[in-house]
Image: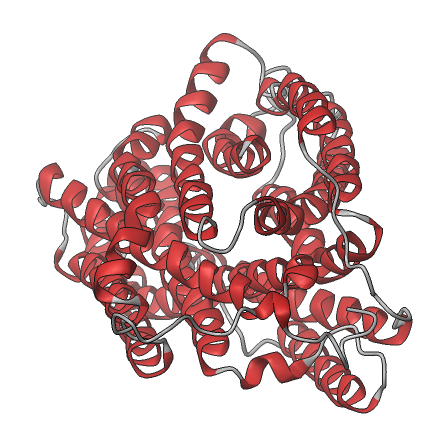
Amino acid sequence: MFTVLIMVLDHSVLNVAVKTIATPAPVGIGATQGELEWAINSYTLVFAALLFTAGLIGDRAGRRKTLLFGMAVFGAGSALAAFSGSSTELIAYRAVMGLGAAFVMPATLAVLMNVFERDEQPKAIGIWAGGVGIAIALGPLTGGLLLEHFWWGSIFLVNVPVVIVGFAAMALLIPDSRDPDPGRIDPVGVLLSIVGLVLLVYGIIHGGELASLSDRSVLLPLVGGLAVLAVFVVYEHRVDHPALDFSYFRNPAFSAAITATALAFLSMMGVAFFSVFYLQSVLGHSPLQAGLLVLPLAVAQSLFAPRARLAVARFGAKATCTAGMVMIATGLACFAFFDATTPLWALELAFFVQGAGMGHVMSPVTVTVMQALPREKAGVASAINNTFRQIGGALGVAVLGSLLSAAYRGGIESTLARTPGVPDEARHAAGESLEATLAVAERLGPAGRVLIAPAHEAFLVAMHLAALCAATVTLIGAVVVATYLPGRRKPGAGSPPVPDERPAAGVAGG
């Protein structure tokens, strides 16, 4: 729980601090918009690309060793990032933090699966999922308080004492566990997975930066990543000691749970991306205020995730997760009706409904994924779950961001063309985003005021479209879980087979 807290909190804290980091020295380091994006994305790229490999290593070398290694690397990266003298250094040290996090996250769930027995695992995973909500809630508060009293590097330096305490506690309390029969290593499969994921995630991230998935610099890594991953799948089917046994995906519940995770995070991360601009640029809230307004989502998730097992016990995973996905879709669809005059209570209610939905989805689907594989493969199961979650989240920002950008440009271009004083070379840049248009309006002075209302209107129309698309994607996820997740077991029907008792044949190297 300590590791989950610090990993998620670090990400949410950075979102609050980006404006300060962009300020010239001595307040910040004068990072450009692109450099700020890569300070976030370098972490995501390394983290997502190495999750599967780190899970394999944890199963073979021991989960406690992997966890301690990851925490040590994450702590060192945090200390270095705190004293970065340039944007390049910050980006590099954030990548080091991503390396540490990649070894930590799969190990956390794998440890839970090996510390707790099967009937206790849903409760433990529910608390784990609730911890994510707590970390999301603490992030904006922690970041705001640190930035008010200390320099920008304090948001990273605060990780170090937490890592030290956590490292000592884990070394003393966590029992080590590993796959007793890992078989031969599959170096070709591991290398293919890393290369494929690096290319795919880079393409998705770059597409989000350009707000376009059709640019050649986006398409080449995307297609290349998919091609390498296709070779990975073919190779794993033919080798006698695969790193990943794809027969697990023949389990409908396992595949449905993975799909639900990816689609839920695709929608939620995409909406989180444009809700920042809505809260700050349209409604006029500060970054800290905007972070506080999202608290109902985090609070709801932390309240309902540990209790989702009770709903599963009463109604079954199918009904619980379907209802959760519908709640997420409802909360997202609310953004299609929000405008500059929407009362805060309506916004807070929508966030709370989204968080309650995530609490009823994240915990049961994680339990389904983790219990579908044998206990000795817990690191792989956790890595697969986290990898699909990261890819879904990155896709949400890229796809919905591209949709938002295209719709916004279509709504503002005619106004920009009619506005006197806007240079031709600045007109294209001003149509890229709401922030870019408002920046041009500010440079024009009083003459630029005529751009503000149309820019807000164009953004709201684009936001409404993106929100409806996100809600639709989530409803597709609801159909998937309603079709393939198991329903409520009838009393006296007997227990299902325990995955831990299945032979691990054909999974050597996993």
Question: Which image quarter: residue 235?
Answer: bottom right
Question: Which image quarter: residue 77?
Answer: top right
The C terminus sits in image quarter = bottom right
Above-or-below relation of 71 to 204: above
What count of labels does the image hold? 0
Q: Is residue 370 left or right of residue 444?
A: right
Q: Is residue 35 left or right of residue 254?
A: right
User: Residue 195 or 126: which is nearer the viewer?
Assistant: 126
Q: How is the image coloured?
A: secondary structure
Image coords of residue 44 (percent x, y)? 63, 51
User: Residue 463 or 298: which is nearer the viewer?
Assistant: 298
Image coords of residue 46 (percent x, y)? 72, 53
Looking at the image, which residue is at 74% across and 73% down? 196
Looking at the image, which residue is at 84% across and 51% down? 61
| Residue 178 visible to the viewer | yes
Looking at the image, which residue is at 41% across and 49% down? 436
Above-or-below relation of 45 to 388: above
User: Residue 34 or 279: which is nearer the viewer?
Assistant: 279
Image coords of residue 409 (percent x, y)? 35, 66
Looking at the image, which residue is at 67% across and 43% down? 104
User: Residue 382 or 272: which is nearer the viewer?
Assistant: 382
| Residue 415 visible to the viewer | no
Tell which residue pokes out farthest to the top in this image.
149
Above-or-below relation of 256 to 450: below
Question: Which image quarter: residue 298?
Answer: top left
Image coords of residue 315 (percent x, y)? 21, 65
